[in-house]
Amino acid sequence: MWAPTLSSSSCSSEEREESSGEATLTPVYLNVYDLTPVNNYLYWFGIGIFHSGIEAHGLEYCYGAHEYPSSGVYEVEPRNCPGFIFRRSVLLGTTTMSRSDFRTYMEKLSRKYHGDTYHLIAKNCNHFTEEVCSQLTGKPIPGWINRLARVRSVIVFCQKAFSLQLLVLFQNALNSLMRRNQTQRHLLCQMKKDQSSIS
């Protein structure tokens, strides 16, 4: 778990409070955005296609895809992520992490989240905010945020398992046919030998 570090500078009141041993609590928000207007209907069923960003100290960080092997983490103005429709903010908890430590943490974490490793089901913006939230507050993000990706991953798993099961059944049927053919060939050969020995 993260522990606050003491700053040698005393430029801000936040840093002064840290150096005096008093930890300040900063709210951590999950800013949720709609990717599609269909969310207006899906939202009431506890699912949707959402983008999310994590906000603390007046900074919001998000994760997105691009084709380069560099960080896909970016900073935006809170509750104003370009290309998405802001839905709501969810207070996730608080953190004692200072603004500078928060930025440093995001810089380190961004090395793990490259734009070319983004995956809609397995490693998306909501997985990123889940990890950040866990680190900052010790709590997960609400389940409805990434539920559709989890449902989709279960479907994909079932499809693969079902396909594998079909493949095994097909393989067993093929092996059975091959054994039957071998037995029939063996019997035919035996019958021919028996006929040739009689004549």
Image (cartoon, rainbow, N blue to C red):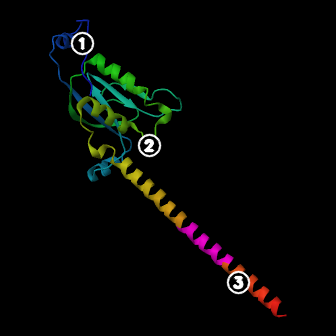
Among the two numbered marks 2 and 3 on one chain, the one whose residue lies closer to the N terminus: 2
Q: Residue at x 80, y 91 (%)?
A: 195
Disc nearest the viewer among 2 and 1? 1
Among the two numbered marks 2 and 1 on one chain, the one whose residue lies closer to the N terminus: 1
Q: Which residue is mark 3?
A: 187
Alpha-carbon span between mark 3 and mark 1: 87 Å
Q: Nearer the viewer, residue 159 or 31?
A: 159
Disc number at residue 6?
1
Q: Residues within 10 Å of mark 2 (few under 14, many from 20)?
A: some
Q: Which segment did they paint magenta?
A: 169-182
Disc nearest the viewer among 2 and 3? 3
Image quadrant where residue 111 sits: top left
Residue 184, placed above or below residue 31: below
Q: Residues within 10 Å of mark 1 (few under 14, many from 20)?
A: some
Q: Main secondary structure of the magenta part?
A: helix
Q: Residues within 10 Å of mark 3 (few under 14, many from 20)?
A: few
Disc number at residue 120?
2
Q: Nearer the viewer, residue 161 or 125?
A: 161
Task: Identify which amino acid the numbered label 2 is placed on.
Answer: Leu
Residue 130 x %, y %:
32, 37
Q: Residue at x 70, y 83 (%)?
A: 187
Residue 116 x %, y %:
50, 34
Among the two numbered marks 3 and 1 on one chain, the one whose residue lies closer to the N terminus: 1
Task: Identify which amino acid the numbered label 3 is placed on.
Answer: Leu
Residue 193 x %, y %:
79, 85
